[in-house]
Each structure stands twice: as C-alpha cells, then as structure tokens.
Image (cartoon, rainbow, N blue to C red):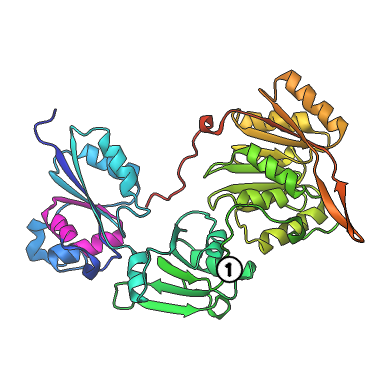
Amino acid sequence: MCEKRQKISLIGIGMGSRASMTMEAAEAVRACDCMIGAERMLSSARELRYGTGRQGDAPEQAESLVPELCEYNSDKIFAYIEAHPEYVHVAVLLSGDTGFHSGAKKLSEMFARDSDRYDVTMIPGISSVICLAARLKTTWEDGAVLSLHGQEENFIQTVNKNGKTFLLLGGKDSGEKMITRLKEYGMDDVTVHIGSRLSYPDEQILSGHPGELEEGAADGLCAAMILNPNPDKRTGPHIRDEEFIRGNVPMTKAEVRAVSLAQMELAENSVVYDIGAGTGSVSVEAARSGDRIRVYAIEKKPEAAELLVQNRKKFRTDGIRIIKGTAPEALRDLEPPTHVFIGGSSGNLREILCTVLDKNPSARIVINAISLETVSEVMDAIEEGLLKDAQITQITAARARVLGRYHMMTGQNPVYIISSGRDRKENPAETERSPDR
C-alpha cells in the first residue's frame, strides 16, 4: 500500500457561477494544487481562487497559480492524473451535481480500481433542474427527470404520462428539437418553462406553449420544466383494437398481443425488433412497456408504414423508430436486439433468424404464425437449431357479437405463438446511455 494516497476531489460546482458553488466545493478548490475541468468550470474556480476570470490576470499572484488541464473527457482526465503523481490534491470540476448525469460516476469507478493510490471524495453541487424548480417556486420531487444532453433520448412518452417533467438540455439544437418534437406529437396544450444561464447575471426563463416559443429559445446548456394538464395515467401497455388507426392493413389482435408480449419478457432497456410491424399495434404496446425501451418497427408496405407514423403520433410513443424495408436486409445496420417479434416474414423466416442470431445469439424471439406454411418454416428452424428450446402455444379466441337479443360467439383465426431464446436475465446487459460529461 502507498504511504500517502493522492487526494482526488470530484466537485460539482453547480451551474457555473461562483454564487451557485457550495462552501464545501469552494474549500476544495482553494485547497487543491491542480485543477481540471472544462473552460467554463475553470473560469469559475479561478475567480474563486484569484479573484479573476483568467489565469495570468493577476501577475502578482503568479507564484500561487496552480497547474490546470482544460479537459472534460474522463479517460483523458484519468490518464493525466495517473501521469502526475506529484499533485497531492487534484480538483476535478464538474457541472451541476456529481450524482446527476455527471462524469463523476465514471471517474469514481476508474479511481476505485486502485484505491491504494487514490483517495476520492465526491462533493455534490446544485443542478440546474433543482435551480429551475426553485426559480419557478415549485418542487422537483414529484416530476420525472431526464437528460437529453449529448444523446438521443425518448422523452415524449414520459411527458405524456407525467404532469411534470424536467429535462436537462445541452448540445447543438437540443432545445429546438425538444420544441419541434412536442409540436410533432400534438402536445400543444403543455406549458414549457426554459431556464438558460441559470445563476448568471443574464439568467433568463422563458415560458409558453410549444407554438409560442421562438426558435433558439433553448440554445446551449438549459433546463426545462414541462407541465402536462392531461397526463395519461393508464398503467400497462394494453390498448383496445378499436383505438388503433387501422386502414386496410392486418393487425395482431388484442388477445394475441397480450400473450405474445408476455412471452417476450421485456426488460427496462430492451431493444426490440418488430418485423412485419403492420399498423404498429405490437410496436406501440412494446414501447409503452417502458420509457427506456427502443423499438425498431420494420415494415415494407408503404400504406402500413404510414399507419405506423400515425399510431406512433397518436399514442405518443417516441421510443419507436420506423424502418421502411424488407427483412433481413432492413435489419443489417440496426443495433443488436435483445428481443424480436416476427409477425410477418414474407417467406424469409430462416434468413431473418440467422441475421438476428448473428447480431445477438441470446435474443429472445417470439413468432406469430397463422398459416400452416409459416408453421412449417418454424418447425424447420427448430430442427436446424435456430430456435432453441422453443415453446409453442396455440390460442383461439372468440368475441361475442349481438344478433337481436342474442349474443353469438365469433371465432378469430387460430394463432401459433412460438417463443425461443434464453431467459432475459441471461441476456447481455445493455450499457447505460447516460452521457459522460
């Protein structure tokens, strides 16, 4: 064990201004002999240490200036500290709070691998979400909280289900994209509050409905609070058949959807292929099973693809990505799936299974078969070993229809539901999508 460990302070400096920094963070900044962070964070730290915004503005204090590294990439920060053991106390400056979508998580894990060498302290800060809630004289404990910083995240579905949603915005055009998507999904009745430059002298909060907010209202690092006066409080994914926009495209009926989705055993971060998606009934219910589920709806027919667009908008399931094309060709550039539903294969079942299993041998696969020809293809795939430990269920449902004063049962087509693949707990865990910043 090293006689003296290098002290590392992972410091959440709040929103950036000196006023939003806690006393604990300020003390760590004053005590360090090396500072690391993005330029905005370093500027705040310099103001605290030297009473100036730029290193070198106070030449009489030159001897007290500490080395700096302008960097926010975790791997580069770790490599720099590892290469400079002479620094007794290193302050790594991070925006907002260390526990909220911060690079502190990854850095802490990296330093923990060599705990004999590094003594790590994590100092929390005030996040822009907390500040915005305070400025609007409300709470954040009763709202959903998402980060859209540096990633493509589903948020429409979350806004649709919650009366209050907080979004952490950042990156090029993220605010404009947020407003555009709210309009696209017909969410004109929500109220959006956007806070920019929070804690700085030019702090600004803009409020209004999506159609009232001007372009560029949420440029740069911002936080937003969205209030939905009519949140959808339904639990579970199940939707009645008549609620879907149908057209002339076949649709997997509610009874079959219920059993098929149960057989899929979806998990929190599932990546789902819905092959032969049709109207999108399975895609919509799969997406509604969890806000972080991503669904790729693959459909070759133009009319069906248009219905997919309409139903995605109607049910506000922005977790669905519509892929126009024929499987397996349309699957080749997609990320590996954890779950696959095959409602239509156009005679390409074997090729589809080979493509899917090549991407992820542990994918959970559920197939619906109505025709005996498709059942024959399934049996061939089982014989070939493409569907291991397959479970086959055949269901026939009947619905009552009124004839005068009588109720007559009308049978639906019998459907074979074939499921295969390892238990979901054995599927490779999906890596977290939170940004490292």
| The quadrant where residue 383 appears | top right
Q: Is residue 217 above or below residue 148?
A: below
* Residue 73 appears left or right of 22: right
> Left or right of 286: which side holds 222?
left
Q: Which residues are magenta?
A: 24-45
Which quadrant is the N terminus positioned in?
top left
Above or below 99: residue 187: below
Residue 77 position, x and y percent, is: 29, 45
Asked if one can make out residue 197 in the rendered structure from this viewpoint, the answer is: no
Q: Amino acid at mark 1?
A: Leu
Q: Is residue 41 magenta?
A: yes
In this view of the protein, which residue sits in the foreground, 183 or 61? 183
Tell me, yes or no, if residue 346 can be seen here.
Answer: yes
Dividing the picture into quadrants, the one containing residue 114 is top left
In the rendered image, residue 390, in percent from the top left (x then y), is placed at 69, 25
Which residue is more in the foreground, 205 or 35? 205
Who's the residue at 70% across and 24% down the image? 386
Q: Is residue 197 above or below residue 103?
A: below
Helix, strand or loop at label 1? It is helix
Residue 96 lies in magenta, yes or no? Answer: no
Left-right relation of 129 to 315: left
**Residue receiving disc 1:** 182
Q: Residue 406, percent across and down?
A: 89, 56
Q: Position of residue 50 (x, y in %)?
A: 13, 65
| Number of other residues with Cα within 10 Å of mark 1, as a class: few under 14, some 14 to 19, many 20 or more | many
Magenta stretch, main secondary structure, is: helix
Q: Residue furthest front?
A: 405
For image coordinates 86% across by 49% down, the residue present is: 409
